[in-house]
Amino acid sequence: MESQRIVERDVNTQITKITARNVNVFYGDAHALTSVDVDILDKTVTAFIGPSGCGKSTFLRCLNRMNDTIDICRVQGEIMLDGENIYDPKVDSVQLRAKVGMVFQKPNPFPKSIYDNVAYGPKIHGLTRNKAELDEVVETSLRKAAIWNEVKDRLQAPGTSLSGGQQQRLCIARAIATSPEVLLMDEPCSALDPIATAQVEELIDELRSQFSVVIVTHSMQQAARVSQRTAFFHLGHLVEYGETGQIFTQPQDPRTESYITGRIG
Amino acid sequence: MSDAVFFAPMPDAPVPRKGSLMVQDARTRKRNAAEARFKAYGLGAIGVGLLALIILITSILGNGTSAFRQTEIMLNVELSEAKLDKSGTRDLEAMKKVTTITYGPLLAKGLEMAITEAGIEIEGLTSKDVSAMISKEAAAQLRDLVLADPSLIGQTIPITVLASGRIDGYYKGRVSLASAELDSNVTPAQLLLADALKDKGLLATTLNPAFLTAPDASDQRPEAAGLGVAILGSAYMMLVVLVLALPIGVAASIYLEEFAPKNRWTDLIEVNISNLAAVPSIVFGILGLAIFINFAGLRASAPIVGGLVLTLMTLPTIIISTRAALKSVPPSIRDAALGVGASKMQAVFHHVLPLAAPGILTGTIIGLAQALGETAPLLLIGMVAFVREYPAIYTEADGLFGEPSTALPVQVFNWTQRADPAFFERASGAIIVLLVFLLIMNAVAIILRRRFERRW
């Protein structure tokens, strides 16, 4: 049944959104990522899998320069978003992050109202001209994040009063409210129960029609369920990258096979 | 992972102990005894602390509450035109030439008349003794009254004047008939007269709001001394500290915590700020004397100088507590803000700072409370001076908060140095006022904390 789904699904776009070439990341003297080359496709869910500390989250955070906030972190190489190098000195990371949104491992809504949580991004980027437009953006985002029906009657309630799964969907709504082109998700379901996880996974599949989604996950089942392409990281190297079905059924590299079958990890 | 896992007993596991759960073994007894001992030590420590607090408070309240009550004499005084305004023109300038020396005998005469009218006869009472019952402050009080309203001249007006410090002390237990025998400032006859006046309702010990509003008074008239100038000076200084230390401290903390690169220089600054918090306060006084008075040429004893010195002293406290408050905001909030494309400054000001606000406010108010009670640096910049004029907020000559003043803790220090025991009561009373201000500030800190506290 599981494998059935994977085979049925195919990658329906071949437009490259992000191109990474020879990316190296250092934390002080530690070499965290070694020459990673990846092409991430538009309107596709790409999953990064691998054991803990393999560098998949580090690489994800390179894609919207969240690593800039870590003092000792250095990034070398080239990451192109629509043909523009995001590590060019001329690039303002604030503008980049408006295009490349991010959802974190732990749900982290602002301790403000649900409405303010979603409205914050559009407000600071000046995406709306008036309150009516802002209301509309908030509603659309909450609808896209499949949480509108649960919160429409209490938009002024604090975001932190929601349950964990709702909080994470609120964070997704917040991320898509700025209409990004790429959505990065760093283990978005690791703090959620199976039902909330299923809701978020369903949501990711729907979001694929509008964004390029990159998801880091510890769960291989999740990668198999939601993604079209999968990258396997191991010890700071990108071991294998390809279509999800192929990675899980006919891995080329023995390390990938060992990981998938549970021998390393 | 549905496979059941069976745990085999580990080969080198200790042999399970045999014995009833109802009986404590030696090891458990020993551990329980140690715990009981530790609890006893803790309880003892709290007991000692509470005892010290109780002793302190009873001692201060016992000595100080009487400062809020004062003995007063009610009498009628005849304002004779012949003495107060010889020209008869009611010309203020001419009337100002008449000093308190002229007003004194008028009061004495009024009191003598009151005694005669009441039919009080005390043996061995000279008219000098009678006039000495009235505070030396009373003549000035009467003069001010007349100068403010010259039409009173020629009338006989009722007036309530302070009794002298010794008479006041008699009703507060400081002075007795026995001690009056040995005291050159008071005679037993005066005390008997005071009792007689009290019986007739001409002398009473009443609430004394002047203690909070009147300026300091000289050594000879403790009964007139008040905290007005000191409270005003302390309030001005707190204003200066709040206006300077809060923004500077918070801005410095935000920069150091959120923006500054973590390198050797910021480490050095950090260590120095922490050390600055432990520098003896008198050092700040010397610094203030050298910089603000000698170099910058500000006026000695001015609240602005005191405020600047206390600002320097309070800054480390505010910076340290603000940084702790900023640190305690979870990094996930910063990530969330940066993740939707907020700039670092937006992340700090929209999200981190509001969450850190309760901590920052608490730190600031604790810093202010510390500054309010600080004495040593103020001694060095001359705030210990005897000041009778209320300082103005702004004057052309001295600028903002530039007029000499004194401060609450310095007034306490000042009064404890004076010989008359009545000043000891005043000093204790001033400590009560200081403690009440500190309590109010701490209450405000708690209320603000509750108000701004948010959960995440």
Image (cartoon, rainbow, N blue to C red):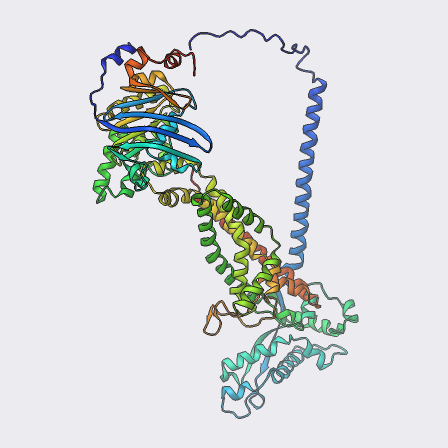
Kindly identify the residue that appears in the image at 42 percent across and 42 percent down. B355
**x 20%, y 23%: residue:** A13
Q: Does residue B456 appear in this view?
A: no
B25 vs B174: above or below: above
Taking the image as shown, residue A37 lies to the left or right of residue B183, namely left
| Residue B443 placement (x, y as % from top left) | 51, 49
Can I make out residue A211 in this image? yes
How far across and down, in percent of the image, does residue B292 sit? 53, 65
Q: Residue furthest bottom?
A: B87
Residue A53 percent location from the top left of the image? 43, 24
In this view, the residue in front, B138 or B246, is B246
**Front one among B21 and A79:** A79
In the image, is residue B277 above or below residue A113?
A: below
Q: Is residue B265 left or right of residue B382?
A: left
Near-viewer residue (A109 or A249) = A249
Q: Which image quadrant: the N terminus of chain A?
A: top left
Q: Residue at x 44, y 47 (%)?
A: B255
